[in-house]
Image (cartoon, helix red, strand yellow):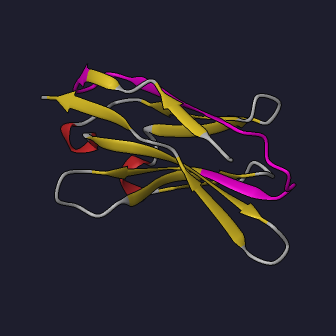
Amino acid sequence: QVQLVESGGGLVQAGGSLRLSCAASPSTFSLNVMGWYRQAPGKQRELVASINSAGNTNYADSVKGRFTISRDNAKNTVYLQMNSLKPEDTAVYYCNRRDWSTRNWLEYWGQGTQVTVSS
């Protein structure tokens, strides 16, 4: 059973910073992608940032220059450093991991952590 456990959410004022962490069960596959998604009330879940096992990153345009994703493979942990937060960043943030099993992608989700940015 793969588990993803997020932490670090909370309430912060606009312009502030938060750091999210996601501790994952070890993967048995060498190729995987870890990412953060978010879902605001009444909106679809969207990709915020992702990082693959080679360290290549991808960001949503709305967070480029403000958020940084990183991973510590020894700890099976992915981080999301969020700076210059805006009220529109308010959402539930979900950790995601996709493992390439050589035949298909296996996908896992965390339970989510609330981030609220006040104006």
How many marks are shown on the rendered structure? 0
Estimate the x, y position of residue 18 in percent, counting from the top left: 41, 24
Judge from the rendering whether residue 87 lies leftward or rightward of residue 8; answer left or right: left
Q: Which residue lies furthest to the front in this view?
A: 1
- Asked which quadrant contains residue 104, the reply is bottom right
Q: Is residue 110 visible?
A: yes
**Vertical placement of residue 107 versus 112, above or below:** below
* In this picture, residue 41 sits left or right of residue 49: left
The answer to which quarter of the image holds residue 68 is: top right
Q: Quadrant of the C terminus?
A: top left
Residue range in magenta is 12-34
Q: Which residue is drawn at 38% across and 27% down?
A: 9
Quick one: 44 or 85, which is closer to the camera? 44
- Residue closest to the far bottom: 103
- The image shows residue 116 at horizontal and vertical percentages of 24, 31
Q: Which of 61 and 26 is in front in this view?
A: 26
Q: Residue at x 59, y 55 (%)?
A: 108
Q: Which of 9 and 26 is in front in this view?
A: 26
Residue 99's quadrant in the figure?
bottom right
Q: Is residue 75 above or below residue 32?
A: above
Q: Position of residue 61 (x, y in %)?
A: 41, 57
Does residue 80 appear anywhere in the picture? no
Q: Is 29 included in the stretch rendered in magenta?
A: yes
Residue 27 x %, y %? 79, 48
Q: Residue at x 24, y 36 (%)?
A: 86
The residue shown at (67%, 46%) is 2
